[in-house]
Amino acid sequence: MGTLRAIVLGCTLKKSPASSSAELLGRQVLADLADHDMAHLARLLAGTPYPSS
């Protein structure tokens, strides 16, 4: 079987370093994936959200 790869993109309106529920959920998913020798976390940079059209 090939190497398992995954990426978790959690979007939040909270600025760093404040934790968010999206980050918590992402960490839980990655913790489960670590059982399959996969573990990596990348947090998206906080930015100004634009209104939807």
Image: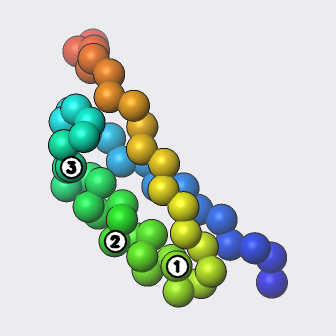
Q: Would residue 1 be found to the left or right of residue 32 on screen?
A: right
For label 1, the SS is helix
- CA separation in Å, label 3 and label 1: 21 Å
- The amino acid sitting under disc 1 is Ala
Residue 13, visible in the rendered structure: yes
Residue at 19% from the left image edge and 43% from the top image edge? 18
For marks 3 and 1, the one nearer the N-term is: 3
Instruction: Tell me residue 21's x, y (percent).
Output: 19, 55
For marks 1 and 2, the one nearer the N-term is: 2
Residue at 23% from the left image edge and 15% from the top image edge? 51
To which residue does mark 3 refer?
Answer: 19
Snapshot quadrant of residue 12: top left
To which residue does mark 1 refer?
Answer: 34
Q: Would residue 32 be found to the left or right of residue 28 on screen?
A: right
To which residue does mark 2 refer?
Answer: 28
Residue at 59% from the left image edge and 84% from the top image edge? 36
Instruction: Tell me residue 11's x, y (percent).
Output: 32, 41
Residue 52, visible in the rendered structure: no
- CA separation in Å, label 1 and label 2: 10 Å
